[in-house]
Image: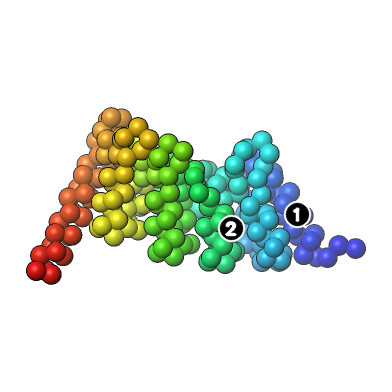
Amino acid sequence: MSSPGSDVAAQLGEAVKHYFRSFVSLDPTKLKKQLSEVSYEQRIAIIQLHYRSSGEWTPVKKAAFRGHSEIVTALLTSLKEEDRMNVLGDCETPLHWASEEGHTDTVTAILECLTLEQQLKLISTRDNCGRTAIHWASQKGHTETVQSNLNYLSPQQQLELISVQNKYCKTPIQLAFSERHADTECLLRECQLRAEYALNAKKRGKL
C-alpha cells in the first residue's frame, strides 16, 4: 500500500510532465502545497525531472522560458538554499531563457531566491557560445530585463559583465548596437559610465 506522500509525488510528477507537453500552467498555490507534502528527496527528483523530448528542459527552465514567475519561485523556494544552484544548471540556465524572452519579473524571481554569491555566479554563467544572460537580453533588446540583471551587481561587477565578450568577441553593448536596439545600448553605456564614475570616486576617496 502506497503512502500519502508517494501518492502526492506521483500526482505531482504527472502534473509536471503534462506541463512540459502543453501550454497549460501549473497552479502555483497547489504546487507549493504538494511540494511541501512530499519528502525532500522526492522534491529534488521532481524539480530535476528532464522531459525526454525536451533535451535539457527542467520544470524551472520551462517555467522561466514561459515567464511563469510564481512557479519558478514555488519550485526554487521549496529547496534548501545550498541546493538551488544545482537545479539552475551551468550552461543555458533558466536565467538565460527568461532574459532572452524578456520576462523581467521572472528574472527578478529567480535572483531573489539566491544569495548574493549565487546571484553573481548565475548572472556570470556563460552558455556554449560564451554568452551571459545579459548578452541574451541585450541581443533581443529587452532593456528592462538587462536592467533587472544589472540591479543585482556592484559597480565593479557591472563593468566586468558589460565588458564580457562572447565566443564571437561581442560584448552586450556591441550586440545591442548591431541589432539596432538603441534603448538597450544607451542603458548599457550609461550603466558603464556610472559604474566607472562610482569606482573612480571610491578610489579618490582612498587617496
Does residue 140 appear in this view? no
Residue that protrudes farthest toward the right in the picture: 1
Q: Amino acid at mark 1?
A: Gln
1 and 2 marks in contact (CB < 8 Å): no
Residue positioned 28% across, 46% down in the render: 162
In the rendered image, residue 15, in percent from the top left (x then y), is placed at 70, 49
Horizontal side of 8 relative to 104 (left or right) equals: right
Q: What amino acid is at disc 2?
A: Leu
Q: Which is more N-terminal, label 2 or label 1? A: 1
| Residue drawn at (56%, 56%) of the image | 86
Q: Which percent across, then down, holds residue 115?
A: 44, 65
Real-space Cα distance between discs 1 and 2? 16 Å
Q: Is residue 103 above or below residue 174?
A: below
- Residue at 77%, 55% in the rendered image: 10
- The reply, left or right, for residue 62 in relation to residue 121 is right
Q: Which mark is residue 182?
A: none
- Asked which secondary structure carries label 1, the reply is helix
| Front residue of this view, candidates 180 and 32 | 180
Percent position of residue 74, x then y: 57, 59
Label 2 residue SS: helix
Which residue in the protein does label 1 denote? 11
Q: Residue furthest bottom?
A: 206
Q: How many marks?
A: 2
Category of crowding for the residue at label 1, using alpha-carbon neighbours closer than 10 angstroms: few (below 14), some (14–19), many (at least 20): few
- The residue lying at 90 percent from left, 63 percent from top is 1
Quarter of the view holding residue 75? bottom right
